[in-house]
Image (cartoon, helix red, strand yellow):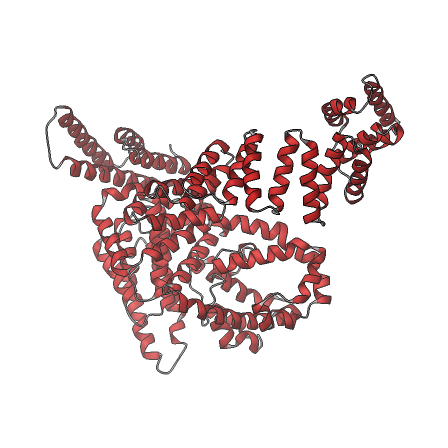
Amino acid sequence: MMNVTEIKKSHANVCQALAKKNIKESLDLIRAMVVESQNGDLIDDHYNIEFTYKNILKYTVEGISDPERQKIYNHLVRDVYRLGDKVADVLLSKFSSDVVFEHRKKYQAKNMTELIDEINSIWSGIDLKKVVDSQAENSVELQSKIVDLFNYVWGKVHIDNDDKKLISDLMFKSGIPVHYKAVLVGGINLSLMSAFSYDYLQLLIELCKHPDDAIAGRAMAALLLALDKYDARLPLYPELYTQLFMMIEEGSYQSLVQSIAIQLIRTRETERISQKMNEEILPEVVKLHPKLSDKLDLDNLISDSLAEGKNPDWEDVFKDSPNLMNKMEELTQWQMEGADVFLSTFKHLKHFSFFNETANWLLPFYPTQPQVLEALHSEDKVFSSESLLDGLSASRFLCNSDKYSLILSIPHMPGMQKEMMGQMFSAEIEQMMEMQKDEQALQGNHKKLVASNQFIQDLYRLLKVHPQKHQFNDVFVRKMDFHKRWFFNQLFDDTNSLREIGEYYFKKNYFEDALEIMEIVRSKSPEATDVIQKIAFCHQQLKNYDEALKYYLQADLVGAQSVWNKKKIALCYRHLKKTKKALGYYQEAEKVSPDNLHTQVSIGHCLLELNDFEQALKYYFKVEYLDPGNNKVGRPIAWCSFVVGNFDQAEKYYHKLIVSEKNKHDLINIGHTLWCKKQRKEALSYYQMSIQLPDHSLQEFIDTFNDDIPHLKRHGIDSGDIPLMLDQIRYSLEN
């Protein structure tokens, strides 16, 4: 007997086989599932489909021409998909205890007509009451029925045209608050994550044209997730593609779809950001807390001047943690881009009873939500003020789920913390509202993009944080590599759309994905030097130096003869151990920019690798002159000085280095220098110090020492003295 894991795995294998057009393999896999189901109808369906497929194969082998053959074949593949879905659903309904199947059992006596009629009936009564009661629409009964409909839609894998029309009429019905309708998009989304539904896909396409941006934005995000998941099936439904294409063309939604695709791709960053918050930023902030309290005036922190620039007091506070300022700026940049920066903060605040209902994880935040009002009914006017709650509702920086977590946690905060947060939050909300006004003026689809981004973040929390998250199909384990999807390439066959995603990957250092896209872009624009350079840079970052060099040289040929490009060519030659060629390109770059520090250092390194120590010294001294605060340049100066026999100069620089940092190699090299100056005892002392460093060992020391023996001999150290020195070192360590 199959268990739940085996059923899901078998269904996934069926879909993979069908995506590769392996029809027989998929039918063989389905046969085992059909037998397991002991369902006569499914057994008959399987027999009929396989019989039809064998006939198609027979006619093909016999060379019988049929102009309808491709159409019949596509229809058959659809039937195989449908049968695979159906038998998996039957088996899971029988054996799985996942919440979606519990909902299905709970509502099996209900139907769509009945549920929507109940909602319409309750709303008609509320409509009349609103004249005398402004809170009438917050009816607990209405909320309960919306949750029932959400759960019913989620559990209803297949709907017919009548059901689809009922949902559509409700969604486009005027009067019913948007938050009740928007949450139902989440129910459709969860259903599609469980199973393919042609009718739900059609409904989402329809909802993308909804006049309310909150619903349209959510529908677009849910649609892209579904299209990504079921991409292999879409060529079998040309009529669906036509509807999709027309929706995008008629609404001029090309840039909107691209932007939401990038929002979905951006979810790759979420765990990385969360890790950075927990491991780098928050520990630094905690360490700095006493200094922040003493040195920063909180009123200044939230004043208007902060929005225009950095608080001057920060520089002083951050001097003990110099990287924190940069990390905070990076955090702000993430936030402005729409990245999910608050997961680590709010994922521990999902234990409130409000989150016991799955629907509430995807419910848009609205200030009159009963549990919000209940949480704030005893709070002072700061938290109960309409302006703060309206501002929080409109804010794009927190997703809806986190807004509810924030409000529900307020009654549990200590008084002082609560008061401080209230004051800071009021000021921050005011600033956010001003920023958002500017953004809305610049971007026509701003509200749709805010709605889609918040919905994606709400969904992310549901799938990653919910106590029963293992029962959901986690769409975020997918790479969201839309550029590989059939539907995306059909809808956007222009280079600009593809390149926008490629540029995002490039900016975020996803070089493998960026490379794939940039190569496609280049095939359509072969002379675009910036694209050639980005292909080269991707190869360089992936350590494919031969390929990187090839493209940098191509860029050089087609006119990108910049200093940057020449230095990249040189860098690749260095990695490929072709140092003379690297030196030549660095010297070309030097002619254009003679005082560039990076170029001077790189030439010095090349000369060092070519054993031209005298010339290397000249370049390192120039770097020291141009950048006097750079202590690291002392290391190659000291080494070159030692190699050319200028021991006093070498000793001086090694002493400077050792004062600031005890480095195992510096200690070995000053030992060499002193030995060559006949100061054997002092040399022994430095050798001992090197070995005794935590990151060093006697064997590592000996390996390094042996590499340097030719230099020691050239400077007069007798070859017979070398094993004696090593034995002296061994005895000294024993003592």
User: Residue at 53% across / 67% down in the picture?
Assistant: 407
Q: Is residue 607 above or below residue 109?
A: above
Residue 565 seen from this side: yes
Viewer-proximal residue, 629 or 623? 623
In the rendered view, does 728 fall on the left or right side of 560? right
Q: Position of residue 706 (x, y in %)?
A: 74, 22
> Quarter of the image containing the N terminus?
top left
User: Residue at 35% across / 34% down in the picture?
Assistant: 13
Residue sitting farthest toward the front: 591
In the rendered view, does 177 fall on the left or right side of 396? left
Q: Is residue 147 above or below residue 608?
A: below
Q: Is residue 641 above or below residue 312?
A: above
Q: Position of residue 6 (x, y in %)?
A: 39, 34
Q: Quadrant of residue 693?
A: top right
Residue 351 seen from this side: no
In the rendered view, does 195 fall on the left or right side of 307? left
Q: Is residue 48 above or below residue 255?
A: above
Q: Position of residue 205 (x, y in %)?
A: 28, 56
Total labels: the figure holds: 0
User: Residue at 56% across / 64% down in the picture?
Assistant: 409
In the rendered view, does 416 fall on the left or right side of 187? right
Viewer-proximal residue, 646 or 429? 646
> Quarter of the image containing the C terminus?
top right
Viewer-proximal residue, 141 or 629? 629
Q: Position of residue 329 (x, y in %)?
A: 58, 58
Residue sitting farthest toward the top: 720
